[in-house]
Each structure stands twice: as structure tokens, then as C-alpha cells.
Amino acid sequence: MNTQDINKRIRLIMDLRNKGIVDTDVLSAIERVPREAFVPHHSRDQAWEDMALPIGLGQTISQPFVVAFMTQALEISDRDKVLEIGTGCGYQCAVLSHLARRVYTIERHKHLLIDAEKRLTELKLRNVTAIAADGMKGWPVMHGLSQAPFDKIIVTAAARKKPPQDLLDQIRVGGRMIIPVGEPGNQMLKLYKKESEEAYAVKDVMPVRFVPLLPDISNKTNDMAATLN
Ligand code: SAH
């Protein structure tokens, strides 16, 4: 890494600190993940700017401030099992993988998932399990094995009206979920704390702009594979 790159990283971390990210574990996770590896070649110069960038298929890599803010709100410990909905390019997942015990991540675009998995493998982030599926249904039971409940859930696409019930069900009692909710142009980031099997404390934390959470898997070949299984 050259001096210019190091300076860009330091500038971003200072910028995030000024914007209210005080959790040093979160800041150091952001500093350790090479964001340039997650953006298209032509956007590499902007990789360490505090801005969202397009990653293809109409999707975006979130703004570092939003990634840091959502991660900080979850208060992740190294004992936590975390579920992420909306892997996208895998950047948020990489940040989580430095903080949590294990990260489970779901993406509905098979192509995005394959690319994200490649990056995560190259970065040797071995505590991540990624699948192509509809994340609105939560983490599926596979080979008779259920991973739920999760200590923390992070949803990086916006639910139209309210969080999917399957996701609320997969939060451990005492756990948290952060999720954008609302119509395009009018979304609010909400923090859920699960107090008992039926009771949640909900807090509005910040207006945001995310792509919508969409049902089902997006890719035809994959739909066929799903039917064959
Ligand atoms: N976490 C990403 C941002 C992803 S953008 C990052 O760090 O950059 C939101 C992603 O959510 C998109 O890739 C979109 O395809 C995905 N998505 C939308 N609805 C989904 C669903 N029901 N299940 C899984 N992924 C979904």
C-alpha cells in the first residue's frame, strides 16, 4: 500500500469519528477492510471516500458511515453469531467478520453472491457462510441444521412496511436487529431489541436510503436449481 492510500484510509477514519462513530473496534474493522477490493475498477479512486458507489445489477455498496453506524448500533461482541441480509459486494460482511464470531449472509442475486464469496475468500475471512436465497425468510434449515437464533441481525435493503416476521423470529431474546423500513425516499433505520419471545423495543435511529428488500431469488438458472433440489 502506498502513502497516498494510507492517508486516504486515515482521512476516512477521522471523518467517521467526526460523524459520531466512537466504537474503536468498529473503526479498526473499517480500517482493516480494503474497500477498493469491493468496488468496480473504475471507482477504485473513490473507494476510501465516505460515499455509496454503484456495484452493478442496480445495487450499491453502502456508504462507510452507514456501514459503521449500523455496525456500532448492533454492539457486536466476538461471541456473537450475526445474520446479514443483502450481501451485495460483501463489504459490510467483511467488516462484520472482524467483529463477530460467525457471520451468515444471504444475497438474492446469485452473481453478486459468487463475486462476494470470491472476495471474502481472497481476504481469508473464514468465519463467513454465504448463500443465495430469499433473506426475507431468514436463514434456512440446511441438512436438518438450524443456525437461528442469531445474536444480531443486520438488513441492508429496505422493508416496505415492516420487518419480515421470519427475521424477527430469528433474533435471540436479548439480541438486536437493525433494518431500514419505508417506501423509497422515506426510509427510516430502525433498531429492534428483542425483550422476550413476543416483545420488542423499537427505536428510529436515522433516515436512510437503501435499495428495496425484494422477495425470492432473482436468477432464473438458480430458480431451476432450487426446484430440482
Ligand atoms: N451489504 C451490502 C449492500 C448491499 S445493497 C454492502 O456491504 O455493500 C442490498 C442488497 O440486498 C442487494 O445486493 C440486493 O440484491 C439484496 N437483497 C434485496 N432483497 C433481498 C432478499 N430478500 N434476500 C437477500 N438479499 C436481498
Image: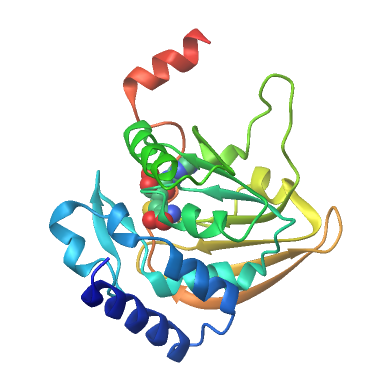
Q: Is residue 89 left or right of residue 147?
A: left
Q: Is residue 33 above or below residue 127?
A: below
Residue reaching furthest to the left: 42
Left/right placement of residue 75 relative to residue 50 reads: right
Q: Taking the image as drawn, is residue 69 in sight?
A: no
Along the line of sight, the residue nearer the viewer: 199 or 144: 144
The quarter of the picture where residue 6 lies is: bottom left
> Picture quarter containing residue 174?
bottom right
Of 84 and 41, the residue lying toward us: 41
Question: x and y percent of residue 134 in the render?
Answer: 50, 35
Query: Residue furthest toward the bottom?
Result: 18
Res. 106 visible in picture: yes
Instruction: Please name the residue shown 42% across and 75% down the image.
Output: 65
Residue shown at 48% from the left, 17% from the top: 226
Q: Give the position of the N terminus as an image quadrant.
A: bottom left
Residue 75's quadrant in the figure?
bottom right
* Relative height, residue 220 to residue 186 (above, below): above
Residue at 24% x, 56% y is 54
Query: Residue 93: where, in percent of width, then height?
Result: 49, 52
Tell which residue pokes out farthest to the front in this image. Answer: 2
Side (left or right) of 4 relative to 11:
left
Q: Nearer the viewer, residue 118 or 122?
A: 122
